[in-house]
Image (cartoon, rainbow, N blue to C red):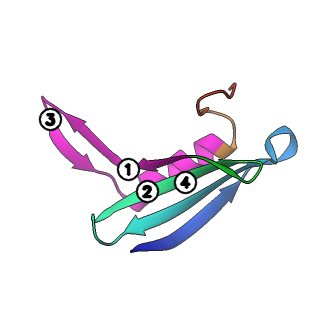
Amino acid sequence: MRVEHGKQWGVDDLSNREAVIYYNQKKEWFEVDFYDSGKLLETRKMVTESLEWGKTVHSLSYAEDAAENYCLGYMAMDGQSV
C-alpha cells in the first residue's frame, strides 16, 4: 500500500508538470510519480543500489527534492527537455 506524502507542481512554462510523493509501506521506501499534462511518465523509487555501497533507502526530504527538481525543470524524464 502506498500512502501519499505530498505533491509538487510546476509553474509558468512548466505548469504542466506535477510530482506526487508516496511512502510504499510494503517495500518501506519513498516513491515519486512524475506527471506531464496529467500523464504518468515514471514512478521512481527513492533507493540507490551500487556494488560498492550496497542499498541506500533515501529519506522523505530526498523524495521531496526529487519532486521539486522535476517540477522546476532541473531534471527531465524520457522525451522531455530540461
The secondary element bearing badge 1 is classed as loop
User: Which residue is disc 4 drawn over?
Assistant: 33
The mark lying in front, picked from 1 and 3, is 1
The secondary element bearing badge 2 is classed as strand
Q: Which residue is drawn at 28% across and 66% down?
A: 28
Stretch of the chain drawn in magenta: 42-70
Cα–Cα span, label 3 and label 2:
21 Å
The answer to which of marks 1 and 4 sits earlier in the sequence is 4
Callouts 4 and 2 close, C-beta under 8 Å? yes
Q: Which residue is drawn at 87% across and 44% down?
A: 12
The answer to whether residue 12 is left or right of residue 46 is right
Q: Residue 46 carries which label?
A: 1
Callouts 1 and 2 close, C-beta under 8 Å? yes
The answer to which of marks 1 and 2 sits earlier in the sequence is 2
The answer to which of marks 1 and 3 sits earlier in the sequence is 1
Task: Depth check: give the residue in front, 79 or 22.
Answer: 79
Residue 66: x and y, percent? 52, 46
User: Which residue is disc 3 drawn over?
Assistant: 53
User: Which residue is disc 2 drawn over?
Assistant: 31
The answer to which of marks 4 and 3 sits earlier in the sequence is 4
The mark lying in front, picked from 3 and 2, is 2
The answer to whether residue 33 is left or right of residue 16 is left
Callouts 1 and 4 close, C-beta under 8 Å? no
Q: Residues within 10 Å of mark 1 (few under 14, many from 20)?
A: many
Cα–Cα span, label 1 and label 2:
6 Å
Q: What residue type is labelled 1?
A: Met
Task: Depth check: give the residue in front, 36 or 46.
Answer: 36
The secondary element bearing badge 3 is classed as loop
The relative height of residue 31 versus residue 41 in the rendered view (above or below) is below
Q: Residues within 10 Å of mark 2 (few under 14, many from 20)?
A: many
Q: Which amino acid does label 4 sit on?
A: Asp
The mark lying in front, picked from 4 and 3, is 4
